Image (cartoon, grey):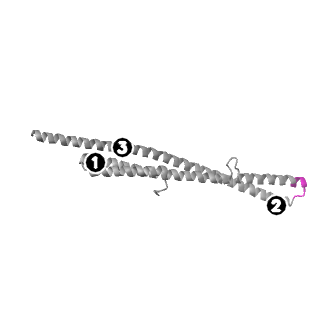
Amino acid sequence: MSAHESMEHAEHAEEASGENRKIALLIAVIALCLALSETLGKGAQTESISKNVEASNLWAFFQAKSIRRTVVQATAEHAKLSLGTMGDDAAKAALQKQIDDWNKTASRYRSEPETREGSEQLSERAKEAEHERDEATAKYHHYELASAAFQIGIVLASATIITGIIALAWVSGALALAGIVVTALGVYAPHFLHLH
């Protein structure tokens, strides 16, 4: 091998080494983005599960309050029928007081704004939890799609080092940008794309 050939070989090796450094940096940046999207995805998934459990619990509490209210109302209605058959005024007054108490209890079961545990408030709270669950689920789907783009980008960038096909690095970069956009949509506009 001549000195000229040696110099050309060294120049090609140096050029390839520089390209490989750039590709390695691209892989590192995409891996960082992947780690962030995975972390955001796990957080959103946990939030979705938590809000789903909360909504289920609130709906169960709502049903229990509704059943109690129905039982109390039916008891009060049944007792009203007995009022007409009673002759003793003291017994009538006592029964009427009990009917009034049952009606107050039924009203409290329907609406209890101070504790937010009336059936109307429980329904509102359950719907809020469902909305938050749906938000978290939409975010989760965005982060999962972004993670897939980042993973494919890493594979293509790695293949660039092996094959020397620079077009793979460009596709890898484009996938990384797409992943960043989808991640941002997950954070700021999770219902912009309908992914589920």
The segment highlighted magenta reads: 86-92
Q: SS at mark 3?
A: helix
- Residue 52 position within the rendered picture, expressed as x and y whole percent measured from the top left: 55, 50
The mark lying in front, picked from 3 and 2, is 3
Q: Mark 2 points at which residue?
A: 81
- Residue 68 position within the rendered picture, expressed as x and y whole percent measured from the top left: 70, 53
Say whether residue 129 is magenta.
no
Q: Name the residue under label 3.
A: 29
Residue type at mark 2 is Leu
Q: Distance between the residues labelled 3 and 1?
A: 16 Å
Residue type at mark 3 is Val
Q: Distance between the residues labelled 2 and 1?
A: 84 Å
Pick whichever, 148 or 193, lies toward us.
Answer: 193
Say whether residue 87 is magenta.
yes
Q: Name the residue under label 1.
A: 159
| Residue drawn where x is 21% and y is 40% of the image | 14
